Amino acid sequence: MLKIVKTTAYTDMKMGTAGLRKKSKVVLQENYLENFVQSVFDAIGGVKGLTFILGGDGRYYNKIAIQKIIKMSAANGMKKVIVGQNGFISTPASSHVLLMNKADGGFVLSASHNPGGINGDFGIKYAVASGGQCPTAVSDKIYEISKTITEYKTLDVSDVDLSRLGTQKLDNMEIEVIDPVKDYVDMMEHIFDFEALKKLFAGGFTMVFDAMNAVTGPYARRIFEEILGAPEGSVLNYVPLEDFGGLHPDPNLIYAKSLVDLMYSDKAPDFGAANDGDGDRNMILGKKFFVTPSDSLAILTDNYKLIPAYKNGIYGVAKSAATSTAVGRVAEALNIGYYEVPTGWKYFCNLMDSNRITFCGEESFGTGSSHIREKDGIWAVLFWLSIIAATGKSVQEITEEHWKKYGRSYYMRNDYEALDVETANQLMADLEARLPQLAGQTFGSYKVAEAKPFVYNDPVDGSSTKNGLIVYFTDKSRIVYRLSGTGTNGATLRVYLERYETENLNEDVAQTLESLADVSRQIGEITKRTGKTKADVLT
């Protein structure tokens, strides 16, 4: 029954900011998945006697990969695997199940917001006992082992039936198949006032939630339609599909176009939202109105007292360096802790574990709190609905009142995609070398106050991480440059533009930032080095 398989190592298994992501056809190579999983097991000193959580977003190859991981887990002496029914579980739900069961780790098979299907992407997130992504030191060790691995362990047995809830045995390992939605819903009911939300919908409030044919479809239908009473049909694209129905499951203005078109039409409901492939990202819309993730984090933080779970206070808030400074102004006004970290949710975990923060978020449509150790799309949607229920105001009214109180950060991310990796790396290296020379220089109406790499010194473990380059201007505007860690096709240069205003609060974002975008290309020598005169994607 035990089978030791000789294998040849691959040298491209370096994990990014949220696990290993590759084209599906790469993962389909002989023993590719097995090599990575065994490398994880070996890197943590083996899994004998441990309990792991397992599931995925339902994308192509999930079903086969989950069976492979179950057999390898048993062969390596794991005590128990808790797996979502039919292999499904969202990233936030998996973090909750891991923490609730005090498990030792887990795998979520997802490439998050990346496209699915055989020509799309596949990913594996490895979570540690804290419920969050593994630290850099662990991922580096996994990578080193993966480059020299020569064999892996598995069982030569039939596939396990994952359609039936309950417990079964595989060799000496226990397999518990759970309803992946139930425990998550119970958690949400303990955070938010569901009775107040039921009254909101009973009063005629309307919403649309686009699950993008991804994993949160069943979660959204259970919560919004079945429990809270949103009209049937409020949840769109709720059946998880292996290729997401051809959609790119990234909840932004570009890829959630049908939802955006609806919300900007005369038939728009009161509220619109979307989640990504594995349920950790969110987009918030009102009638003909879009809320940036940076503003969303700031608004949620400013309204924390409206939520039962947080009414007695929050420790603090953190954001990624690339996220706008909007939440920093809220933290200062509330006199709570405030931190800037590198991009990557794992950097928030130490702050949550040490009770330094309660809320956190990234500009890339990710928001969450210390109820789990991942970002949580449905949590953010329920938070917004709770603010609306408590205030009786629309999304636009809530946001515009926030701007009047704190000022507005006009904000946009410009993505330059599919760049030659060597070109992109050289661009960043040369820009970093030029940063000290920029101070005092003027570009159009913008004068550079300071330019430097962003360096994060973790207050908990003392580690230091450099992540991106920031140019600060005298008028509080900023440009942030960084290379993405989530792509699978060449390199993506991300340039973040921010301009702070206290008077002109309702201007067009693209027009307001047009001159700053030109400055960003000039300072970064983007057109000269890549040939691109404009960004491929603007969000």
Image (tube, rainbow, N blue to C red):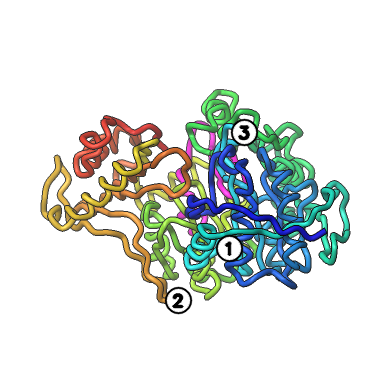
Return the mark for residue 17: none
The residue tagged with tag 1: helix, strand or loop? Answer: loop
Q: What is the span of residues highlighted in magenta in the rendered image? A: 273-302
Mark 1 and mark 3: Cα distance apart in space: 28 Å
Residue 228: x and y, percent? Answer: 75, 46
List the residue tagged with mark 3.
118
Q: Residue type at mark 1: give it.
A: Gly
List the residue tagged with mark 2.
461
Mark 2 and mark 1: Cα distance apart in space: 16 Å
The nearer-to-camera label among 2 and 3 is: 3
- Residue 129 appears in the rendering: yes
Q: Earlier in the sequence, mark 1 or mark 3?
A: 3
Mark 2 and mark 3: Cα distance apart in space: 40 Å
The residue tagged with tag 3: helix, strand or loop? Answer: loop
Q: Residue furthest front?
A: 6
The residue tagged with tag 2: helix, strand or loop? Answer: loop
Would you identify the image quadrant in which residue 394 lies? top right
List the residue tagged with mark 1.
132
Q: Residue at x 63, y 44 (%)?
A: 30
